[in-house]
């Protein structure tokens, strides 16, 4: 498949991940944005569980749609991890990452425009407007920079490990999108309170660029930590778990002639 077509697929896929995942958080997580008119609690918001499922579903659906075209990375960390595992050409890293970031920025801008169309408008108030990621004052639960760094490294490591294992030629065919989507769902269930969950530099950049300089100044962490976790996972999988043509064959029993 030509590189241009693969990059277009990555742009569309990353757009869907950010628009679907962050869109669920911005537009539907707390719907209808306040208590019911009679003062009763309102239970129609998606909440953490709904947003976590939304992110998992974006990856699952796009994996079936474009996995056979571009590999469905949708994430610079995934591209780096696959490169470290020797499953992706280094020459294609920059075009893939540029396409992913561009798709995320388009989604972030469109979300901002749509959210601003609500009566009363949309303000960039609160610690995480537009479902941005952050640490310290911009961590949903007030977690420190170190805690946020560690969770992003560890969860991205696990995410890449699942991707590499699920897409291994020895794994059951056809099920990789399901395991990868469910893994991303679980990752969000764990870390939304900590960083609002990144594990994806493009996803972080695409919304932070519209959320103001203070939030954008924290994006560096959500490039450093996911890429570090992905590189470690790629190295570990390639070193210890990849199929090796030089491995001795499994012993077999040859029946002896009578």
Image (cartoon, helix red, strand yellow):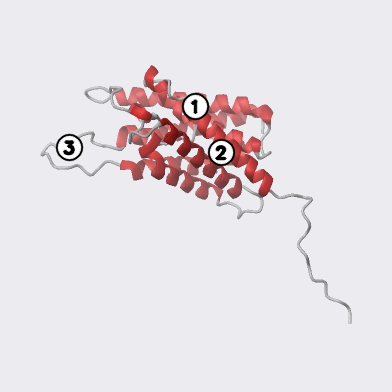
Residue 233 seen in this snapshot: yes
Cα–Cα gap, marks 1 and 2: 14 Å
Residue farthest toward the top in the current orientation of the protein: 213
Whether label 3 touches label 2, CB < 8 Å? no
x, y percent for residue 123? 28, 22
Q: Earlier in the sequence, mark 1 or mark 3?
A: 3
Report the mark closest to the observer, 3 or 2: 3
Residue sitting at x 53%, y 47%: 177
Q: What kind of element bears circle 2?
A: helix
Whether label 1 touches label 3, CB < 8 Å? no
- Against 247, is 93 above or below? above
Q: Quadrant of residue 90?
A: top right
Q: Say the numbered circle drawn on residue 199.
A: none
Q: In terms of depth relative to the viewer, which is nearer, 67 or 252?
A: 252
Q: Say the numbered circle drawn on residue 103.
A: 1
Q: Residues within 10 Å of mark 1 (few under 14, many from 20)?
A: many
Locate the N terminus and report the quarter of the image it occupies: top right
Q: In terms of depth relative to the viewer, which is nearer, 161 or 12?
A: 161
x, y percent for residue 235? 64, 40
Report the mark closest to the observer, 1 or 2: 1
Cα–Cα gap, marks 1 and 3: 34 Å
Residue sitting at x 31%, y 33%: 27
Q: What kind of element bears circle 3?
A: loop
Query: Circle 2 is placed at which residue position?
Result: 66
x, y percent for residue 37? 12, 36
Query: Circle 3 is placed at which residue position?
Result: 35
Residue sitting at x 51%, y 23%: 102
- Against 121, is 148 above or below? below
Report the mark closest to the observer, 1 or 3: 3
Residue 128 seen in this snapshot: no
Q: Residues within 10 Å of mark 2 (few under 14, many from 20)?
A: some
Q: What kind of element bears circle 1?
A: helix
């Amino acid at each position: 498949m030509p590189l241009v077509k693969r990059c277009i697929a990555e742009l569309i896929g990353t757009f869907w991940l950010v628009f679907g995942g962050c869109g669920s958080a911005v537009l539907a997580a707390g719907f209808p944005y306040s208590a019911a008119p009679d003062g009763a609690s309102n239970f129609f918001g998606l909440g953490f569980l709904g947003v976590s499922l939304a992110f998992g579903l974006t990856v699952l659906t796009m994996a079936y749609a474009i996995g056979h075209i571009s590999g469905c990375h949708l994430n610079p960390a995934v591209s780096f991890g696959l490169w470290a595992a020797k499953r992706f050409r280094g020459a294609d890293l920059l075009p893939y990452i540029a396409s992913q970031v561009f798709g995320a920025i388009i989604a972030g801008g469109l979300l901002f425009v749509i959210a601003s169309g609500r009566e009363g408008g949309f303000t960039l108030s609160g610690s995480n407007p537009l479902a941005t990621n952050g640490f310290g004052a911009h961590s949903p639960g007030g977690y420190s920079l170190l805690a946020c760094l560690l969770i992003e490294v560890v969860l991205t490591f696990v995410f890449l490990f699942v991707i590499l294992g699920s897409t291994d030629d020895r794994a059951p065919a056809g099920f990789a999108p399901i395991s990868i989507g469910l893994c991303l769902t679980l990752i969000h269930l764990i870390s939304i309170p900590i960083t609002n969950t990144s594990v994806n530099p493009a996803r972080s950049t695409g919304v932070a660029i519209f959320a103001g300089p203070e939030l954008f100044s924290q994006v560096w962490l959500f490039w450093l930590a996911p890429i570090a976790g992905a590189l470690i996972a790629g190295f570990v999988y390639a070193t210890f778990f990849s199929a090796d043509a030089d491995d001795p064959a499994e012993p077999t029993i040859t029946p002896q002639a009578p």
